[in-house]
């Protein structure tokens, strides 16, 4: 009982620390939306000919058309390259039908992830000032590429990234996807990631505008060829080169890849969750203890220890939990009542993390798009 009591107190401390940290990891203040004034942009500045779009695509026939339609609405002059990563569906045909230049990708070299090898092949053809890295399921609102470039130029930022709005069409998406963004911001606080003086580096791989010269300066994708969390790794390399990066939320970039049920979300998270913990068992145990204290011990200990002190602990835990999650729910136009489900959500995400660790111990570093990446335990 004494252990549970101390875990409950730890949980309260953690929740209120999140709220009072000066970089406000719970906040949604870091965001970029379409300014709505695209028609007022002078024609001399409206051309997008200084941007090349790279879209790696493997079996994305169901999504690539909608993505390219939105890219084509951004403006004139952009070169759009779709790297067809040995798809077994009509990805290449769909891409050509929407006016993209299609590059037939080859089998990834040993040690390379499929996505990064595809991007490396596409990058060899880039000659523009900027490179826009875009996932095949991201739909961009008209004008957002102009705004991304304007922010990069005006604030002298080498890499600008948008955390795309996740799909929120069914119950499981509404339950888990806002929390996915919330947890990501706790792991990689945007307020720190956007500071040059901070070591924290973060990007969202769905939509990244980066200076082409900056990519070349860090060795393009060769220096992160085996990274599974390639977006944050890329931001880290750019930042360590002494250049500025920025990441923010946006409704102007939306993922239209739906998740029909729990399994695809489970697989997405389990693919990289243990990588986030640097394959460390100690960090996994620490993560389990912290999540247990925050999501279960602190909010529920008063149920079997109904003392006045534990009721206060429970009230503090629930208020801290709901207050920290509320801005994310508001940003994605979700009811505050979804916050009550955080203990269940936390349990599911922790289970996904343990799934990731168990797979790693069994020799599977990750599995995605019918490709299996072995862990060091197999060597």
Image: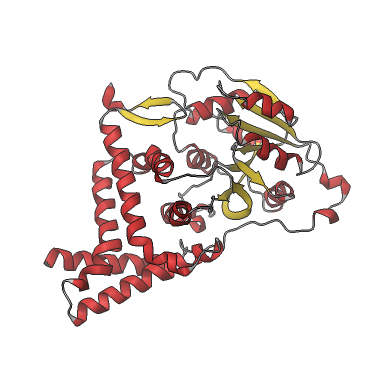
Please state the horizontal and vertical placement of residue 191, each as a whole percent of the image.
51, 58
Please state the horizontal and vertical placement of residue 260, each as a whole percent of the image.
47, 44
Given residues 368 and 91, the one toward you in this image is: 91
Q: Is residue 117 above or below residue 200?
A: above
Q: Is residue 270 above or below residue 286?
A: above
Coloration of the structure image: secondary structure
Horizontal arrangement in the rendering, residue 205 relative to residue 154 (left or right):
left
Q: Quadrant of the N terminus?
A: bottom left
Q: Name which residue lies at 61% across and 54% down.
A: 250
Asked whether residue 20 appears in the rendered view, the answer is: no
Please state the horizontal and vertical placement of residue 135, each as a whole percent of the image.
59, 38
Q: Quadrant of the C terminus?
A: top left
Horizontal arrangement in the rendering, residue 310 relative to residue 43 (left or right):
left
Please state the horizontal and vertical placement of residue 101, each as a whole percent of the image.
72, 26
Q: Name which residue lies at 55% across and 33% down.
A: 218
Asked whether residue 348 appears in the rendered view, the answer is: yes
Given residues 210 and 99, the one toward you in this image is: 99
Given residues 95 and 132, the one toward you in this image is: 95
Horizontal arrangement in the rendering, residue 144 relative to residue 373 (left or right):
right
Q: Is residue 226 above or below residue 333?
A: above
The extreme right residue here reads 43
- Count of all numbered marks drawn on residues in the image: 0
Given residues 75 and 212, the one toward you in this image is: 75
The extreme bottom residue here reads 308
Q: Is residue 348 above or below residue 59?
A: below
């Amino acid at each position: 009982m004494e252990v549970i009591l101390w875990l409950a107190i730890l949980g309260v401390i953690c929740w209120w620390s999140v709220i009072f940290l000066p970089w406000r990891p719970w906040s949604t203040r870091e965001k970029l939306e379409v300014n709505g004034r695209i028609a007022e942009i002078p024609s001399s500045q409206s051309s997008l000919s200084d941007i090349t779009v790279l879209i790696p695509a493997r079996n994305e026939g169901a999504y690539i058309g909608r993505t390219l339609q939105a890219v084509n609405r951004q403006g004139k002059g952009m070169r759009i390259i779709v790297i067809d990563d040995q798809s077994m569906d009509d990805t290449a045909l769909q891409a050509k039908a929407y006016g993209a230049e299609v590059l037939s990708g080859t089998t990834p070299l040993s040690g390379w992830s499929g996505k990064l090898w595809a991007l490396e092949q596409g990058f060899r053809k880039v000659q523009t000032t900027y490179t826009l890295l875009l996932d095949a399921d991201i739909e961009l609102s008209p004008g957002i590429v102009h705004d991304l470039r304007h922010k990069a130029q005006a604030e002298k930022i080498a890499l600008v990234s948008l955390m795309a709005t996740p799909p929120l069409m069914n119950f499981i998406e509404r339950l888990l996807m806002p929390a996915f963004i919330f947890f990501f911001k706790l792991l990689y606080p945007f307020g720190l990631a956007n500071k040059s003086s901070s070591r924290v580096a973060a990007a969202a791989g769905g939509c990244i505008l980066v200076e082409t010269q900056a990519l070349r300066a860090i060795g393009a994708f060769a220096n992160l060829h085996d990274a599974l969390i390639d977006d944050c790794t890329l931001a880290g390399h750019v930042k360590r080169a002494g250049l500025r990066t920025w990441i923010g939320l946006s409704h102007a970039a939306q993922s239209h890849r739906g998740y029909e049920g729990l399994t695809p979300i489970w697989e997405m998270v389990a693919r990289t969750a243990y990588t986030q913990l640097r394959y460390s068992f100690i960090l996994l145990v620490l993560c389990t203890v912290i999540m247990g204290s925050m999501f279960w011990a602190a909010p529920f200990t008063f149920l079997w220890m109904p003392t006045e002190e534990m009721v206060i602990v429970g009230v503090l835990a629930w208020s801290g939990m709901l207050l920290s999650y509320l801005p994310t729910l508001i940003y994605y136009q979700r009811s505050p009542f979804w916050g009550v489900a955080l203990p269940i959500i936390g349990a599911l995400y922790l289970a996904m993390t343990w799934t990731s660790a168990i797979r790693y111990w069994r020799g599977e570093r990750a599995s995605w798009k019918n490709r299996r990446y072995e862990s060091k335990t197999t060597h």
